[in-house]
Image: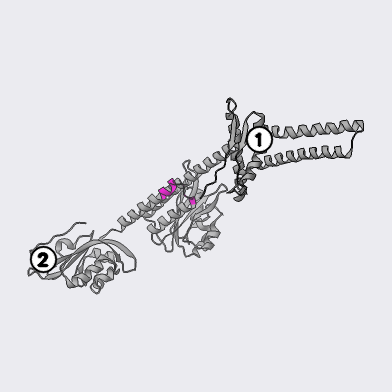
Amino acid sequence: MSEFQYNSSSNHAWGSGMIPPFLRDITDFGIATLRYDGQFLHANPRLVELSGYNMDELGQIRLPDLIPDPSTPVSSWLEDIREHPGQGIKGETLMRHRNGQSLHVYASFTPVFEDSGALSHYLGIFEDISIRKLNEALLSHQSQVLKMIATHENLNLILARIVRLIEEQAIGALSTIYLLDKEGRLRLGAAPSWPETFVRAVDGAAIGPEAGSCGAAAYFGRRIISLDITQDTCWGAYREWILSYGIRSAWSTPVLGKDGSVLGTVSMCWRELRQPTERDFALVDMATQLMGFAIERQKAQDLIMGQQLTLVASSRMAALGEMAAGVAHEINNPLTIIQGYAQKLDHLAGRGRLDQETVQSVTRTIKDGVQRITKIVKGLRAIARDGENDPFQEVFLQTILDETLELCQKKILFGGIQLDTDPISPDLTLECRAVQIAQVLLNLLNNSYDALQNTADRWIRVNVKADEE
């Protein structure tokens, strides 16, 4: 803002507190003359517009009525000039409009002296910087939303931030964001300023030409503007319902994907009849762009996650193939024993030489073999399943190791590889999903087995170290 300097001759001409002729017709700034105590003497039409007070009303109030916050520098300045008149001040502050709303202004107050050196009055200049402050806040919000998108924040948190951006920039607006699901229904993304009854009623609503401004915007793929909800046919059966919330005007804009498909909608609703402004449209367009970025990023992230799960499933199937080969070694041994002892029973029975002690001994051996096979199959079934949704539980590490080795130790030993396991404290536990830990351990053992096929010094050692913390 420009600073004004005054010479002594001009000062003398303004001794009556009148606004200088060359400033009186300026329309970009509010201009006033004030006494040292803040009492308004004269004001130009622009200050009347900024303050909401007419000329007569301004003459009856003081500067603290326009800038009531006692913590502002202007308020402190008014107190100081009572004892030290002649000091000026300038800076940003909030002006209170007659209707109670606050307005950001840049204000400067310059002392004007008589030729004698006595203080005549102060010249106050007020510049409306509300748009600038809104733009600064808008850029800040936009930056925060983009940062949330870049750092993969939860989509609903991002959408809530976008709604907050709209409602802080468009004072008095109530905003909603909906996502369009595969069935063509609106799913609530964010509506923090609306009551719970509204949220429950809207979530899952079908789109259509008479499904309200959001439903129609999603249906037609274009912006829908309802200047007067009582007259707009797009509300259909929803008219009385939305009017019960005090809403009189609304406009909704579809959010389009890269392929032109509708991803969702953004709305601005008002409790009075209202025409949209260029700034309203610019604000919503920015919001839809940010929302589009966020949804497309979420879709890409979901796609990547799906591909990762497919790869994990493929890896698990490959691991199961290797596991099956290892389990064949584990099961073949007890099966061979069972088969041998069954033949022994048959041979002894054929010679009539079966006695109770021999039968019991052979039966115990066969039973042990069956139990070992059962244990191996049980371990195989457990480790082959997806443990992603299992709860975290405290499990003894020795138990996980023993059950995993049951599936592969015979394969390792038959492959001519020495397998050593260092002692593990029987009290050592893990807070984990046991299936996932066993799967990782089994993969490590199988990979170690494969890596040792062409080496002379062939050994595998399992060692566990507990973190002291």
- Magenta span includes 152: yes
Who is closer to the viewer here, 411 or 60?
411
Seen from the viewer's position, the closer of residues 77 and 333 is 333
Q: Nearer the viewer, mark 1 or mark 2?
A: 1
Q: Look at mark 2 in the image and give the residue it sits on.
A: 11
User: The magenta stretch spans which residues?
Assistant: 145-155
- Return the residue at label 1: 409
Residue 352: percent from the left, percent from the top? 92, 33
Mark on residue 303?
Answer: none
Q: Main secondary structure of the magenta part?
A: helix
The image shows a total of numbered marks equal to 2
Give the answer, above or below, for where 272 lies relative to 216: below
* Residue 403 on image: x %, y %: 66, 42
Residue 399 location (% of width, % of height): 64, 45
Q: Residue at 86%, 34% (x, y): give it.
A: 345
Residue type at numbered disc 1: Gln
Secondary-structure class at tag 2: helix
Q: Can residue 161 be seen in this view?
A: yes
